[in-house]
Amino acid sequence: MASSNFNFINPFTFLNVQDSPGTYVGDFYTDNFEKGARAGNVILNLGPQHPSTHGVLRVLVELFGEYVLRSEPVLGYLHRMQEKMGEVKTPYQYLPNMGRVDYLNPIAWNWAFAGAVERLAGLEVPEKAEWLRVVSAELNRISSHLLWWGAFVMDLGGVTPILYAFEEREKINDILQIVTGSRLTYNYFRFGGVGQDADGRFVDLIKDFVPYMRERLKMYKALVTENIIFRRRLEGIGPMGEDICRRYGATGPIMRAAGVMCDTRRLYPYGIYDRFDYDIPTGPTDDCMGRYLVRLEEIKESLRILEQAVRDIPGGPHIVAKAPKPAYKLPAGESYFTVEGARGQVACHIISDGGKTPYRIKLRAPGFSNLSLFAEAAKGTLLADAIAILGSLDLVIPEVDR
């Protein structure tokens, strides 16, 4: 399909507002999709198996020709009751669930839940464990951004880049497998530390990966970023400024592309991130291209953190000497812990009454808020551009649906 990268005539002006079944307020419906389409329009299902949705997400769109008049994301096809499971399991039993909430960035969820438990229990994490947490989190952030990059370009018609993305991801998986024992749904964090110490091979592979990945980013720029067809598909498409981001609670690269420096690592410091020198990329534009560029810049900043981390590796234990046992009961009280995931702010809120299992667990998934922007951002665009907007949000549906 063609892109709408030209002076756009609002399709709503072509319609006679007296034609029912719906009525308009301004230029949009006041009723829902159950009322059907206006005469001459088409309602299209994107999903729940459509490849543009990367998971079990359904998006209803009403089209006037190829223009999107309205859209509505429909969730619930992948709901697994993650929060309810946290209320019927002990903290140790629930810990592996975190790798399944967001299978592309499980380390962030590991950290959010472990951090909330440690804050409630008053556990101090050893220096070596803090170092391993930062290193594993940044490797996982790069890995998540790489898969998004390849899948996003594939949505727009370019198949080759995802093959490069998986080549780099395999190298990261080789590194993380040494300490986590996994290649996807990592369950690495423990209450009071991490599950496995690092060895010399782990550090050597990171030292080799950093310069390698920097060279690959140059290739990505030449192959994709500077491709004129690719740029025409993204530039000026789906602008999401600070106002819409704040109204829907968007965080992460979406908010930073709008020019707002919102990064949990800086706003609410945790771990040992305050010891590293790195920048928080923002802008340069709030359209699809801006969100694309922010994520590539974030990969560069993660490489900076990794480079500094492997220069100064602390000694000591990787977990506290008296770490909580599997039957550990949380003390009564509540805690909240938030981290910066690949898609934005990840948080876990625990309320405990001192029983065997938590009284309440609430998970804050950035993808849910980010998806909420789509209906407003896609209104009036071409269907092909709506797919680009959806892809630029970097959605992982298991996280959104939970």
Image: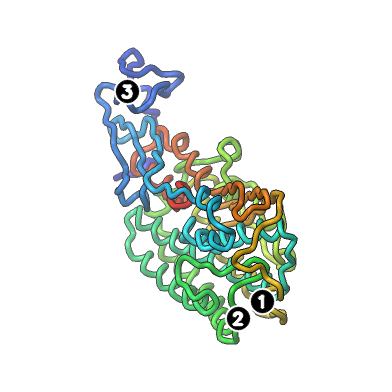
Amino acid carrying mark 3 in the image: Lys
Which amino acid type is marked by label 1? His
Q: Pick the residue in front: 331 or 25.
A: 331
Tell me which amino acid carries mark 2: Ala
Q: Marks 3/2: CA distance?
A: 59 Å
Indicate which label's residue lies in the foreground, 2 or 1.
1
Q: Viewer-proximal residue, 68 or 233?
A: 68
The residue lying at 42 percent from left, 50 percent from top is 391
Mark 1 or 3: in front is 1
Residue shown at the point (37%, 22%) measured from the top left: 13
Marks 1 and 3, the one that precedes in the sequence: 3
Q: Residues within 10 Å of mark 2 (few under 14, many from 20)?
A: some
- Among the two numbered marks 3 and 2 on one chain, the one whose residue lies closer to the N terminus: 3
Give the mark, 2 or 1, whose residue is nearer the N terminus.
2
Vertical relation: 298 (above or below) 249: below
Q: Are marks 2 and 1 in contact (CB under 8 Å)?
A: yes
User: Does the rendering let one see residue 278?
Assistant: yes
Quarter of the image where the N terminus is located? top left
Q: Position of residue 27 (x, y in %)?
A: 43, 22
* Marker count (numbered): 3
Provide residue 100's location: percent of width, then percent of height. Answer: 47, 59
The answer to whether any part of residue 283 appears in the image is no
Residue designated by label 2? 198
- At a point 56% along the width and 79% down the height, the residue shown is 206
Query: Which residue is denoted by mark 1 in the rendering?
Result: 318
167 vs 342, left or right, is left
Near mark 1 (Cα within 10 A), the count class, few <14, some 14-19 or many ≥20, is many
